[in-house]
Amino acid sequence: MSELDRTDRRILRELQLDGRITNAELATRIGLAPSSLGERLRRLQKEGFILGFEARLDPHKLGFGLLVYVEVILDATTPDVFDKFAKAVRRTPEILECHMVAGGFDYLIKTRLPDMAAYRRFLGDIMLSLPGVRETRTYAVMEEVKNAGPLPI
């Protein structure tokens, strides 16, 4: 994997701010010829610096106004239990993010649902049926102060 130079970093900063920017506009902002920009973009994607492009949607307008984080404690911390839990989580579309963490619990899960009644169903029907789950703790978000900020490149 190659090192990022100053121009690569500028490209990545601009893309984080506006993923829909045209290559021509991006090349102008960076001060590169469009062909040089294209080569850099292909390299940044190939090397995994750019993972993809997606639209950010308003969850409230789409009926997913309740943001919830769930701490998960497993009944055992063995490679087999971790593997089964991770595989089940990857197959669960309601789980938006799942992170193995160090500390007083094993995983932190992020989900969005319409309301608390939907969360209650999610907890009973999905979370507690995941392999190895012994205990959960729920944190319903009251206000999103900052969400999805760009990386400080």
Image (cartoon, rainbow, N blue to C red):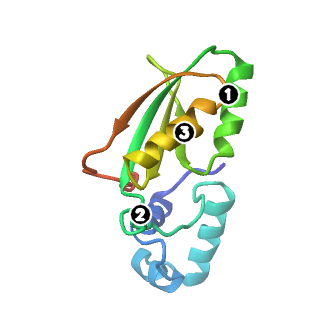
Q: Position of residue 58 (x, y in %)?
A: 39, 66
Q: Which mark is residue 63?
A: 2
In this view, the mark in front (3 or 2): 2
Q: Which mark is residue 43?
A: none
Residue lying at 29% horizontally and 52% vertically, measured from the top left: 146
Of labels 3 and 1, earlier in sequence is 3
Q: Which mark is residue 98?
A: 3
Question: Disc 3 versus disc 1: distance between alpha carbons?
Answer: 14 Å
Viewer-proximal residue among 77 and 14: 77
80 shown above or below 10? above
- Crowding around mark 2 (Cα neighbors within 10 Å: few <14, some 14 to 19, many 20+) is few
- Crowding around mark 1 (Cα neighbors within 10 Å: few <14, some 14 to 19, many 20+) is some
Q: Amino acid at mark 2?
A: Gly
Residues under numbered marks 3 and 1 in contact, where contact means CB atoms less than 8 Å apart:
no
Q: Amino acid at mark 3?
A: Cys
7 shown above or below 89? below
Residue under numbered circle 1? 131
Is 147 on the left or on the right of 85, as rendered?
Answer: left
Of labels 3 and 2, earlier in sequence is 2
Residues under numbered marks 3 and 2 in contact, where contact means CB atoms less than 8 Å apart:
no
Q: Position of residue 9 (x, y in %)?
A: 46, 59
